[in-house]
Amino acid sequence: MSSNVNDEFRQRLERRRRHRSGLTAETIVAAVYMVTGHRILGRRFKTPVGEIDLIAIRKRRVAFIEVKRRQTTEDAEDAITLTMRRRVRRAADLWLARNPQYQDYDVGFDLVFVLPWRFPIIMRDAL
């Protein structure tokens, strides 16, 4: 019985650690985008159809940004699935429908990898 309790406790701690790690990665990426002249319009935009990590605007381009924090580039690339891409695009469509003032803007889907001890790798229009 105590083994199950310990396992559940460890799993909860690991989920919290991953959650905090993801928030930290998103904060880093938001700072990089702001330094490059973007304004952050949203963070962790959740919908029934999907979630967008960051939404940023610069000039006439709205960027929907997916952030992946992993140990290696290969691990980050493996986390980009077709299902994830579809969810981000559906969530972006919903966000644009709710924010009609951006309907005529260029739309981009950026992918950013956050790896240990490296500057974030930003890939514009990668999703």
Image (spheres, rainbow, N blue to C red):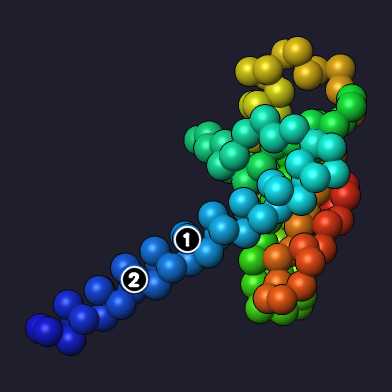
Say which residue appears at 53% left-offset and 37% top-offset.
46
User: Residue lying furthest front in this view?
Assistant: 35
Q: Position of residue 3 (x, y in %)?
A: 18, 86
Vertical comparison of 17 with 94: above or below:
below
Check disc 2 and report the residue beneath it.
Answer: 13
Q: Quadrant of residue 69?
A: bottom right
Check disc 1 and report the residue beneath it.
Answer: 20
Mark 1 and mark 2 lie on one chain; the one further toward the N terminus is 2
Relative to the observer, which residue lies in front, 6 or 37?
37
Q: Position of residue 111 (x, y in %)?
A: 78, 54
Q: What amino acid does circle 2 point to?
A: Leu
Which quadrant does the N terminus fall into? Answer: bottom left
Q: Secondary structure at mark 2?
A: helix
Say which residue appears at 70% left-offset and 65% top-offset.
114
Q: Secondary structure at mark 1?
A: helix
User: Residue lying furthest left in this view?
Assistant: 1
Residue 49 appears in the rendering: no
Say which residue appears at 62% left-offset and 53% top-offset.
26
Relative to the observer, which residue lies in front, 39 or 109?
39
Vertical comparison of 7 with 114: above or below:
below
Q: Position of residue 127 (x, y in %)?
A: 80, 50
Q: Quadrant of residue 23?
A: bottom right
Q: What amino acid does circle 1 point to?
A: Arg
Say which residue appears at 68% left-offset and 17% top-offset.
99
Residue 29 appears in the rendering: yes
Question: Neighbour class for label 1 at 10 Å: few (<14), some, many (≥20)?
Answer: few
Question: Neighbour class for label 2 at 10 Å: few (<14), some, many (≥20)?
Answer: few
